[in-house]
């Protein structure tokens, strides 16, 4: 946008200082204005402004803001469109990277995962944070020295030829598309909660906000929009946590009392695990699992009996002129009866597994402070469970670390800085801005669990808070309560909470005004939109710049390339929205799958390409294909949704007990091995490429040697 871009003729330190000063003023004014906007809405709520209007106002105001930035940042200049003119200051690039990184999984799913899984959820925080250390040490400054626009562009330049570039394009599209589906799915959940529209309509409403930023101005618009989005999302995340901290402990910085609250939650867990009412609920689930097991012994006979019983119930109600509501409920039960034996087997198997998982203390959740499942000092089965749980914990950390260091849309951000030093500094700022949320997420999970265990559990069903009914309307799979033991009192085993709504529901759980719920939803929307912008841009740029310009038509004009990128961005966005509307899997799995894809395909090729000048193009190509291939194969064979998509019917066989979410743990070492071994038996890269690698690794070369290599690099 004009007010956020220095003159194209301005050069030198003075111009940069003036530009930074201008940015500081713009975003200080923006932050103050946004806080004032929230305060005004809070006052209007007290005067009777309806919740529906608050939701629509937040949705329209935030998307309108992002659209305004996108319109003012429109450009057809290639450098501006692809890398924001390479003049984004480190601190603002750090904020933009933070927003680009704070996806729906981080904002919505992180605390929810910690709520549901306790200690094991910390793998996400440790993996993602450690990944930025790898970015700072091994990738960001060196990639900036190479000076390309995209990761496939780097692969093509470093390894020579179009094959490494093409494989990089395919891998970038695969991991980015998987990731963007998760963001658009999150957009649908949030928009539905804000406005009450259907989930599918919510997806396309949010899609407008995504497109208007990235479509018009590319990386330039996305960068300045992401800075604005980070400010919104961090304010939205912090307010409910501070409120709960004050409510429960009178401490405005609840992170410092995290350990104390965890002790209280642990003590409450011990009480709930022995509660007679909770044991009644567990027995209901156990009986349900046993009954389903009996049905699965002879599904044909059981299905016929179920259908006959449902038909008889409908007929009896009609004969007795029953209430319309009773008849409707009975007809729904009849419609829910599986159509054939195969469908019955599939439905009952899934229901039996779900019942078995719930027939455990604390509604099937592990104790929050329990490190791993099983017992290292128990019987062989307990020891095996402990080893498998620990192995998966470490494998997930590894995949998330390496995947973070190889995600194309994150690495692209470091092409936008004015210098290598600014690229390195911006990684530090990125870590700081990400730390603010990651340091808070474990605290939020414990505070919400304390609230649920001590306030919600034990409440009569007829006095449950209104937010439970409203979330059930959004999606019963995200939140559901059923009085299983018929005592009229809610037990922990009778409430099912999806991890994707824990953060969004926190303000209502804590008793905050609805305007804060709208604020948190707007923050989640900002997180999902900011990441979706970067991902869609990555896919569109891979197709327009790397495939079309670099491989098909090298003489294409700048205007044609940018126009093609915009058209492709629109097509990809609509395709991702169509997939997200099918609700293919939970947000966290989709995101983690993207990390495994990125890790297995890019990390070995990037690291060896930077630090080993002997790595060859054919070796990199084979290494990327091998790593990505084994990762994708393992996911298809072991992940339930993917098995259904590809029609896999063979029994699931996990390798060393590793879950499909961590499939990259097999692809990364295979990629390294293939690249190293093939490089050793193939001709070395030409002198130009080897000199280019030397220049990137050893910038302190003096005299004519440095001048010669610098000429090669540029």
Image: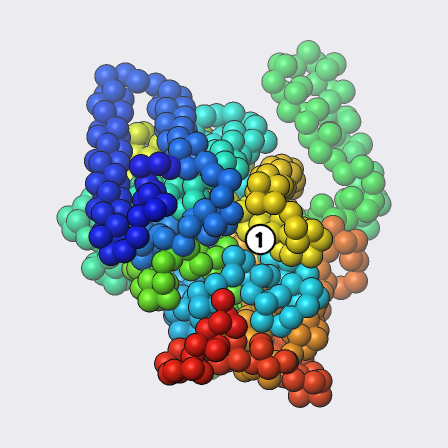
Residue, x 48% and y 57% (percent of image)? 412
Instruction: Say left or right for 473 vs 300.
Output: left
Residue 8: % across, % down = 36, 45
Label total for image = 1
Residue 615: % across, % down = 61, 80
Tell me: residue 637, above or below residue 327: below
Q: Is residue 294 visible?
A: no
Q: Quadrant of the N terminus?
A: top left
Q: Dot 1, crowdedness within 10 Å: few (<14), some or many (≥20)?
A: many
Q: Check the image and tell me how it is coloured.
A: rainbow
Name the residue furthest top.
321
Q: Quadrant of residue 23?
A: top left
Badge 1 is on which residue? 176
Residue, x 33% and y 67% (percent of image)? 421
Residue 569: % across, % down = 59, 41
Tell me: residue 37, above or below residue 632: above
Tell me: residue 255, above or below residue 580: below
Q: Is residue 536 visible?
A: yes
């Amino acid at each position: 946008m004009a007010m956020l871009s220095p003159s194209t003729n301005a050069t030198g330190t003075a111009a940069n200082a003036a530009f930074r000063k201008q940015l500081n003023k713009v975003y200080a004014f923006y932050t103050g204005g946004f806080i004032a906007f929230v305060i005004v809405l809070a006052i209007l709520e007290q005067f009777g402004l309806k919740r529906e209007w608050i939701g629509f106002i937040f949705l329209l105001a935030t998307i309108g803001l992002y659209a305004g930035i996108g319109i003012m940042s429109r450009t057809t200049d290639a450098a501006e469109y692809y890398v924001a003119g390479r003049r984004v200051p480190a601190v603002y690039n750090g904020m933009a990277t933070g927003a680009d990184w704070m996806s729906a999984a981080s904002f919505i799913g992180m605390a929810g995962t910690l709520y549901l899984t306790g200690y094991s959820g910390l793998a996400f925080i440790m993996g993602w944070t450690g990944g930025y250390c790898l970015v700072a040490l091994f990738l960001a400054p060196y990639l900036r020295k190479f000076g390309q626009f995209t990761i496939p562009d780097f692969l093509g330049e470093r390894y020579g030829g179009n094959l490494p570039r093409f494989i990089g394009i395919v891998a970038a599209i695969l991991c980015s598309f998987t990731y963007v589906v998760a963001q658009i799915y999150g957009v649908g959940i949030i928009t539905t909660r804000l406005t009450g529209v259907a989930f599918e309509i919510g997806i396309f409403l949010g899609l407008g906000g995504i497109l208007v930023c990235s479509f018009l101005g590319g990386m330039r618009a996305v960068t300045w929009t992401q800075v604005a989005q980070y400010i919104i999302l961090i304010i939205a995340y912090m307010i409910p946590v501070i409120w709960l901290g004050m409510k429960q402990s009178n401490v405005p910085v609840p992170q410092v009392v995290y350990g104390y609250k965890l002790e209280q939650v642990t003590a409450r867990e011990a009480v709930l695990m022995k509660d007679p009412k909770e044991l009644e609920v567990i027995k209901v689930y156990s009986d349900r699992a046993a009954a389903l097991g009996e049905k699965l012994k002879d599904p044909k006979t059981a299905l016929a009996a179920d259908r006959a019983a449902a038909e008889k119930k409908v007929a009896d109600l009609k004969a007795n002129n029953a209430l319309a509501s009773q008849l409707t409920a009975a007809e729904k039960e009849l419609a829910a009866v599986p159509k054939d034996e195969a469908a019955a087997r599939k439905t009952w198997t899934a229901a039996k597994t779900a019942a078995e998982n719930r027939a455990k203390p604390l509604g099937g959740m592990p104790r929050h402070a329990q490190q791993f499942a099983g017992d290292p000092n128990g019987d062989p089965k307990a020891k095996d469970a402990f080893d498998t749980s620990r192995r998966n914990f470490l494998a997930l950390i590894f995949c998330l670390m390496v995947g973070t260091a190889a995600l194309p849309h994150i690495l692209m951000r470091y092409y936008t800085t004015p210098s290598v030093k600014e690229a390195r500094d911006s990684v530090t700022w990125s870590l700081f801005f990400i730390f603010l949320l990651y340091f808070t997420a474990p605290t939020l999970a414990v505070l919400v669990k304390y609230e649920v265990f001590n306030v919600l559990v034990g409440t009569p069903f007829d006095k449950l808070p209104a937010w439970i009914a409203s979330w059930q309307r959004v999606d019963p799979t995200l939140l559901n309560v059923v009085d299983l033991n018929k005592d009229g009192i809610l037990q922990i085993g009778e409430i099912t909470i999806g991890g994707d709504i824990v953060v969004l529901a926190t303000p209502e759980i804590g008793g905050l005004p609805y305007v804060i719920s709208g604020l948190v939803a707007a923050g989640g929307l900002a997180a999902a939109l900011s990441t979706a912008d970067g991902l869609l841009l990555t896919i569109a740029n891979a197709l327009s710049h790397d495939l079309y310009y670099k491989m098909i038509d090298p003489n294409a004009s700048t205007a044609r390339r940018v126009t093609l990128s915009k058209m492709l961005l629109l097509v990809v966005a609509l395709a991702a929205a169509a997939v997200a509307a099918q609700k293919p899997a939970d947000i966290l799995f989709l995101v983690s799958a993207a990390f495994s894809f990125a890790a297995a395909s890019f990390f070995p090729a990037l690291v060896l390409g930077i630090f080993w000048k002997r790595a060859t193009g054919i070796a990199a190509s084979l290494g990327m294909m091998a790593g990505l291939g084994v990762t994708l194969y393992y996911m298809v064979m072991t992940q339930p949704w993917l098995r259904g998509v590809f029609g896999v019917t063979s029994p699931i066989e996990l390798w060393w007990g590793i879950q499909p979410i961590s499939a990259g743990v097999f692809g990364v070492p295979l990629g390294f091995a293939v690249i190293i071994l093939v490089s050793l038996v193939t001709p070395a890269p030409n002198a130009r490429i080897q000199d280019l690698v030397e220049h990137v690794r050893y910038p302190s070369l003096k005299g004519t040697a440095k001048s010669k290599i610098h000429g090669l690099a540029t």
